[in-house]
Image (cartoon, helix red, strand yellow):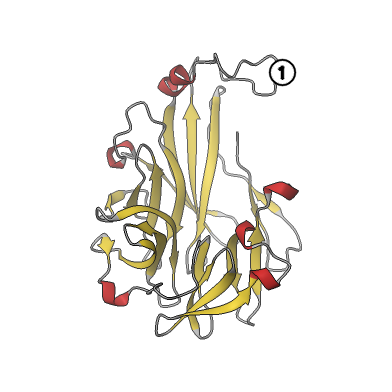
Amino acid sequence: GNTKLYLTDVDFSGFNEISLDFEKPENSQSYMRTTVAPDGSVYVLLTVIDYGTFKLPDYDDPNFDYEDFDYEAMNEAAEYSYTLYKLASDGSVISENPVTNVEKYSEDTENMVISVRDITACSDGNIILSLSGEKETYCIMNENGEITGKIDVGSDTHWINYFGNDSDGNVVCAGYGSNGEALEYIDIEAKKFSDDSVNVSLENSEISGINSISTGTGEYTLFTSTQTGLYGIDKDKKPVEIINWIDSDITGDSVRSVIGLEDGDFIVYLQDYTKN
């Protein structure tokens, strides 16, 4: 499939499609991953998958045989290319750079499809690249599309679901490890977790099932949404419940993104498959 990109304002008064000029082979697929930097710049990572002469499946064909189709041959025919775009807040393209050596930083991808699950812009101009393969890996990339290394998440980390920036410009991640769910800071320069003393302790807190993290406003440095509520992380790195989803019109499981506004309101993006 192909992804479309739109630009809107806080009031959702209109949706303007952003068109990126790129060469799309006839027998190919493409998708985009987007992120907004703290300075307002928008980064788009475009992945184009060229299958050459291999005939892609027609999933809309009622006679398509899902069981006998040769997906392995399809994956072997795929050639991946990546391009990083930097956009201004009005959608105009500031820069366009190829991203290379993605496969080099992926974990054992033999017979696996490499995909970019997510990208996250940091306040220092770097971008975190989350790569899905046999094992997920997390890389640092600059705005020129150069991958400068891989984040060492240690052997106790099972996976990281989300990255984000707090209001002080620090990079935070939410994930799971040997000790359960965690909310930890990343030292981007050292490409590893920060010292435990700066992390947010979730022990004895009500935070469970984090499904988004975003930059805080006012007295909070960070916002995190869970299945049951929206929490703010204060200056002392203590979680405080702001909204209880159970007592609201919003289902916490459907929350995918929360944007805190300066006036104290929030924009909440929901994705509820049961209601389309």
Residue 211 placement (x, y as % from top left): 53, 60
* Residue 1 in the figure: left or right of residue 84: right
Q: Residue at x 51, y 77 (%)?
A: 232
Residue 87 placement (x, y as % from top left): 52, 56
Q: Residue furthest front?
A: 204
Q: Residue at x 33, y 51 (%)?
A: 139
Q: Residue at x 65, y 69 (%)?
A: 245
Of 151 and 161, the residue lying toward us: 161
How packed mark 1 is, by other alpha carbons closer than 10 Å (few <14, some 14-19, many 20 or more), is few
Query: For mark 1, what is the residue?
Result: 62
Of 48 and 274, the residue lying toward us: 274
Residue 108 sits above or below residue 222 on the image: above
* Residue 50 in the figure: left or right of residue 26: left
Q: Is residue 143 visible?
A: no
- The kind of secondary structure element at disc 1 is loop
Q: Amino acid at mark 1?
A: Pro
Residue 85 placement (x, y as % from top left): 48, 49
Residue 90 placement (x, y as % from top left): 61, 60
Q: Quadrant of residue 259?
A: bottom right
Q: Is residue 76 visible?
A: yes
Residue 223 sits above or below residue 148 on the image: below
Q: Quadrant of residue 152?
A: bottom left
